[in-house]
Image: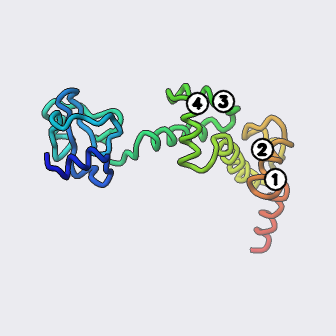
Amino acid sequence: MTREQWEAIKNRDKNYDGLFFYGLKTTKHICRPSCPSKLCNPKNVIIFSSVNEGISKGYKPCLKCRPEASDWQGNKAELVDNALLYIQEHYREKFILSELAGRLFVNESYLLRTFKERTGHTMLEFHNITRCKIAAELLMHNELPISYISDSVGYVSASHFTRRFRKIYGCSPSEYRKNYINSLLQT
C-alpha cells in the first residue's frame, strides 16, 4: 500500500473509488476507498486492483460501500431511491411514515432527514406531487369528472385534492383542464 492509497482510505476520498480497492485481513471484506466504515489499522489492509481480484482471494464485498456495484451512489442515495420508488408505487394509499421506515429498516427521523437532504422535498410533499402529477395527466381527458380523478389518485375528498393541486400547479384542477383544452384549440 502506498502513502497516497492510505491517505485516500483515511480521508474516505471518493476520487479514488474504482482506481483501487482495499481488503481488511481481519474481516475479509473488500471496500472502496470512500467506505464509511470505521477506520481500519493500516497493517490490516491489502490493496486490490479490482473487486474480482479480492473476491478470488476469499474476500467478500462490504455491505456499506458496495464495491461490486460500480454505479452505486451510497447508502443514502439507495435509501432515497427506494423511498421514491415506494411512494410512486403506493401513491393511492395514505402515506404512513412508520410503515415506510419499517420496510426500509431505518429510523423514521433519519429517513425524513435523508430524503429532504437529497430531494429538497419532504416525503409528504413528494407524495402529493406524485399524486397531482398523475392527476394532471388524467385532467387532459375531458370526460373524467374531477371527483373521479381525485378519488383515483388517492384523495379522500375533492376539496383536499383541489387545495393540494392548487399549491403545486398554481391553479385549480378545473382551471388546469380549461387551460389545457384552450391550448389545444389554439394550435
Q: Which residue is mark 3?
A: 96
Instruction: Give the image quarter of residue 161.
Output: top right
Q: CA distance from mark 1 to mark 2?
A: 10 Å
For the N terminus, give its image quadrant.
top left
Residue contact at pointers 2 and 4, CB within 8 angstroms:
no
Badge 3 element: loop
Please name the residue shown 67% across and 40% down the image.
124
Residue contact at pointers 1 and 2, CB within 8 angstroms:
yes
* Sequence-earlier tag: 1 or 2: 2
Is residue 88 rendered to the left or right of residue 183? left
Residue contact at pointers 2 and 3, CB within 8 angstroms:
no
Q: Which residue is mark 2?
A: 149
Badge 4 element: helix
Which numbered dot is residue 173?
A: 1
Q: Which amino acid lies under the numbered mark 2 shown in the image of this protein?
A: Ile
Instruction: Give the image quarter of residue 109.
Output: top right
**Nearest the camera: 47 or 63?**
47
In this view, the mark in front (3 or 1)? 3
| Percent of width and height locating residue 16 | 27, 52
Q: Is residue 174 above or below residue 26?
A: below
- Categorize mark 4 by other alpha carbons within 10 Å: few (<14), some (14-19), many (20+): some
| Percent of width and height locating residue 19 | 22, 52
In this view, the mark in front (1 or 2)? 1
In this view, the mark in front (2 or 3)? 3
Q: CA distance from mark 2 to mark 3?
A: 22 Å
* Sequence-earlier tag: 2 or 4: 4
In this view, the mark in front (1 or 4)? 4
* Sequence-earlier tag: 1 or 4: 4
- Categorize mark 1 by other alpha carbons within 10 Å: few (<14), some (14-19), many (20+): many
Q: Which residue is mark 4?
A: 108
Is residue 14 rendered to the left or right of residue 142? left
